[in-house]
Amino acid sequence: MLILGPSLLALALSFTDFRLGIQDFRWVGIENYRGLASEAGLRQSILNTIIFVAVVAPISIFGALWVAILIAGLGRLGAFFQTTFFLPVTATLVAMATAWEVLLHPTFGIANSLLTALGFEPQRFLSDPDLALWTLALIAIWKMLGYNVLLFLAGLSTIDPRLYEAATLDGAASGWKRFVLVTRPMLAPVMLFVTVITLIRAFSEFELVAVLTNGGPDGATEMVLFTLYQEAFRFFDIGKAAALAVFFLAVVMTISVLQIKLADKRA
Amino acid sequence: MRSLLFAISASLAATVASADTTITLSHAWPHHAAWQSQVASDFMEKNPDITIDIQAPSTDYDEGFVSVIRQSLAGTPPDVFLVGSHLLGELAVRDLAPPMDDLLESVDMAELGYSDEALALTQIDGVQIGLPWSSSTPVMFYNAELVREAGGDPENMPTTWDETIELAQSIEALGDDIEGFYYPPSDDDWLVQNLLATAGLAPYADCEIAFATEEGRKAFSLWERFHDEAGQEPIPNSAARQIMYAAKLGLYFNSTAAVRSFTREIGDRFEWGTAPMPKLTDDGGVASGGMAAVILTDDPEKRAAAFEYILYGTGAEGQATIVKNTGYMPVNSGAEAILADFYEENPAWETSATQMSRSLPWFAWPGENGIRISQEVLDTLQAVANDRLSSDEAADRLVEEISGLIE
Amino acid sequence: MMRAASVFILLIVSVFTLAPFAVMITFSMAGTAEIYAGAMLPRPTFEAAFENYRTAVTEAPLMRFMFNGVVVCAAILVLQITIAAPAGYALAKLPFRGRSLMLIAVVLALMIPMQLPAIPLFLAAANLGLLNTYTALVTPFVISAIALFLFRQFFLNYPQAVLEAARLDGFSELAIVWRLLIPAAWPAVAAFSTISVINHWNDLYWPLVVITETEMMTPPVGITTFRSTSESSGNVGALMAGGVLVTAPLVLAFLFLQRSLMQGISVSTQDSPR
């Protein structure tokens, strides 16, 4: 019974968050519910978000799993790599943004010096509309990978080595077979958590856009949360913001229900 | 009647009750923090009974505006707000800037060095709602060494866009790693206003959007010509600025307020200077902009104290401090005497002041969508720069978007 | 052979990972002239380093920002765990009506970013006179859905038999949480603490909304003081120095605490799977 209190409180508050958000929209919505004038901008923002999530989430989940398995096989040397990959996770993005800008500078950035040395054309990483979103995706992966690696390593460490021995005895000779037989099922809970957290972070990316591109060039890096923020708090156009919020919540709700269903089925 | 009461209570407050008044002030641009607090501490030294409490600076004019709106919603707006000139009207539309009539009755502004033109900058429909705190026009920054190498004369910079673009081509031809020209898209639409201004136009006049007129489209097409003819790369302003500091960019355009940064970053590594904005047509001018000091509080005692401070900051002494620390132009004729020697020694600072005679007044879009219109303009500029739209298509898009956004 | 290939691949990824840090540190020690001389990586000098770091510390009270950051992160973390651990236990092990509904609510809340409820929360904070206080910086985050979710996942696998035995021994439900489950869930606690501290140390958005006094700024907000769009982009060296100073505490803390953190989290070399 004592336990119920805090969890109810948690529940109440998690709903408060939710309702407060809605209340917010109603509050300004009354006086200012404008027509959704130019839908093209919103569509682009949603499309960008989908592309971004579709690139960032799989790479930072499966890439991290792969890196974690490589590291786990390395012993002491693995600790070095693990630390290396974790550094970006701890980095303050506002501070690192300047470093990224210098690295990716259109004329004297190191990235372009490398490209030129290899015989490629220099690129405008952050200001070319065809490239900017991919650049942000790359930086997002840089930022997320390390944490997922850490979680997978934690998961791998809980697997009893005897399970692998048993699998080998059962004829699982190749590394891949042992992975399918032992690693994959044993990592399922960690995998679930990593997937949830990566999806959330990719889907609600805000800082990268705000700090590095401001949504530009010409809306090429607008993403849902940034657009929502712009519409509500910069343009005070609550109509559009509300439309985006509804979309955002619908997606979020779908993902959460799916996650829970999956989690309970596995558990 | 009401304003009279205000005036009486205000002067009462000023003379009797002004024991210890604290005025909160909000301004934008973190790199202005040092001189803003310099002005404040100079003032407090002379007025120990008034404390100026400066909030942490907002990152730009638009963020500052948003932050003040938020604070007003919560009922705790700053007492004084230094608002970007393009947002002054939006502040008024939202009823956040009470008229200053109560405070102005007791002073003779002309005698204090404020010209009618200066005062008009911060009037909305003839009502004074603020005082101009700083004012600027854009100028052409040039790398004198590159200009000379390309056959130009730094003492005699081109005065028309055609000649300027030609010079840019010669500079660009000096080497693979040399850029000829960069005209920034800016953080709002002020520099686009300035393209129009070089043809003597304002973005919106007599119910007509300049992008819809033939002259306006011609002026707007300069942006496309910069990229197609002058060799401008579609890169961010900060990146271009770094190329300029690296002595690899010939011509660069921006507010005279950047002069201070140029001085600091370039030092004596190479010779540089400023020249007046080129013209497109003979009657071409420059668009001015800056920030206005607006008193938001309605507490009479605070209003009186805030007014004291604004008079100091926009007065001769305050302006001299501001000009020397930024490159802004003085808004008060009293400052000119103080600054004469300074200008003599630092000619790069003076260019903006010399084009005052052809400067257009501050411009703001009517209605309350100024920030969004700025964003539309910036987006469109990027589309043109990246060859997504031709200049004419871009002008069409702007006319369509903007006419839906102004009332 | 396999080992060499792994090391090679990891090295390549490491170079990409470390490049921005290398750039930041090198530039933070280089003078303006050197930076703009056009070399790919400028040559660091002692004088330039001193000048850049001096500018970084004097132009804004960076130390004060970091102190604020530490206070805020610590308060948030302690409160989050205090609340989430029992709640996670209830969600995992105590059957009650509407449990799965509640779970969905938790995950949903977990996915709602701060930007959505920010304005009403801001108004609430303003009405309570809490702007520019630690309370305003901490309170919205004390209930962490991530922590709840994580704890629940870990508690799920805890053997029911042990719980029954503890109850028979007279353990209260709370005692079960703090004396049995939390020690067993050390990896979860460690993993969560890491992400919580990182997130809140680096959070830019909420502090920007509720803090208008320089005194109360947290490190990322403080660093924007240097990084105002175009004007100060010139002084790259000082910008980078500020970046190094703000980034260093977390990196150092991580390096320092890594071993104890890893005891729970990481693979120990002896029993690593082959």
Image (cartoon, coloured by chain):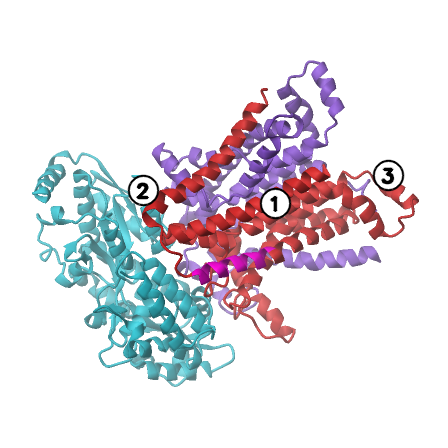
Which chain does the purple colour mark? Answer: C
Which chain does the cyan colour mark? Answer: B
Q: In this view, does B188 lie to the left or right of A100?
A: left
Rendered hue of chain A is red
> In the depicted view, which residue is nearer to us: A101 or C257?
A101
Circle 2 SS class: helix
Report if residue C52 lies within the magenta region. Answer: no
Separation of marks 1 and 2 at Cα, in angstroms: 34 Å
Residue annotated with mark 1: A197
Identify whether B371 is placed above or below B8. below
Amino acid on which disc 3 is placed: Arg
Amino acid on which disc 1 is placed: Ile
| Residue B198 visible | yes
Separation of marks 1 and 3 at Cα, in angstroms: 30 Å
Indicate the quadrant containing the N terminus of chain B: top left, top right, bottom left or bottom right: top left
Q: Residue B73 carries which label?
A: 2
Q: Which mark is residue A162?
A: 3
The residue located at (30%, 58%) in the rendering is: B325
Q: Is the magenta stretch mostly helix, strand or loop?
A: helix
> In the depicted view, which residue is nearer to us: C42 or A238?
A238
> In the depicted view, which residue is nearer to us: A55 or A46?
A46
Indicate the quadrant containing the C terminus of chain B: top left, top right, bottom left or bottom right: bottom left
Neighbour class for label 1 at 10 Å: few (<14), some, many (≥20)?
some
Which quadrant of the figure has residue B375? bottom left
Chain letter of disc 2 in the image:
B
Q: How many labels does the image show?
A: 3
Q: Give the range drawn in magenta.
A: A39-53
The residue located at (80%, 43%) in the rendering is: C272
